[in-house]
Image (spheres, rainbow, N blue to C red):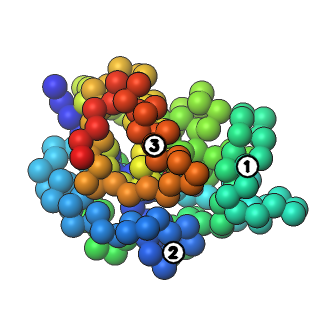
Amino acid sequence: MTRALLVIDVQNDFCPGGALAVPDGDAIVPRINALMEEADTVILTQDWHPTGHSSFASSHEGKAPYELISMSYGDQVLWPDHCIQGTEGAAFHPDLRADGDLIIRKGFRAGIDSYSAFFENDRTTPTGLEGYLRTRSINALTLVGLATDFCVNYSAVDAARLGFDVHVDLSACRAIDLDGSLETALEGMRQAGVQIFE
Ligand code: VGL
Ligand code: ZN
């Protein structure tokens, strides 16, 4: 098996002090750095939104962050403005050894969000990551990063559906946990065949 490490969205806006801070989000950085040192291939993702992105509550009259709206591609949680292209909030955490082999940016189309590293939230528009992995004969992935219940979850489930052998290392993940979303995510990942390590 040829395994790669997939580091999801370890960006300032998801860390304490950021626009969409995940509790304890920065605590995973040392562990991820150690995992990177051992990995043969490291892929990082970066949430990368234009201003006025449709996943921002501020783009919808009368809507507040964490409300749900219905988009053409399905339900969408509305978020505070975050990870705007080129801003400090969108940069990797300064202590992260962000020297991976590939950086995938996602969520850059104004009208659609992209939690997964593989597909936008319509679950069909590809990011190109699958092709990258296949052409390099990578068939196994270990996922770490932020947030467990959103971007890690969607990426892990898509990877498992695409036939990759998928591990999620929870010691190097942190969750947002909106209304039980962490439990739902863990259950969904297990059902998709993802192996979860505490
Ligand atoms: C994420 C919410 C909005 C994530 C990204 O990285 O989990 N969550 N954008
Ligand atoms: Zn986002």
Q: Position of residue 103 (x, y in %)?
A: 39, 51
- Pinpoint residue 27: horizontal percent, then vertical percent: 30, 68
Question: Residue, x 46% and y 32% (percent of image)?
Answer: 188
For the point 41% across and 39% down, the residue is 186
Q: Residues within 10 Å of mark 3 (few under 14, many from 20)?
A: few
The disc label shown at residue 68, or none: 1
- Say above or below: 68 vs 191: below
First along the sequence among labels 1 and 2? 2
Residue at the disc numbered 3: 183
In this rendering, the answer to whether 107 lies above or below 50 is above
Q: Quadrant of residue 174?
A: bottom left
Return the x and y of residue 33 as percentages of the image width and height: 21, 62
Cβ–Cβ below 8 Å for labels 3 and 2?
Answer: no
Quadrant for the N terminus, please: top left
Callout 1, which amino acid? Answer: Leu
Residue 54 at x, y percent in the picture? 74, 53
Q: Nearer the viewer, residue 97 or 195?
A: 195
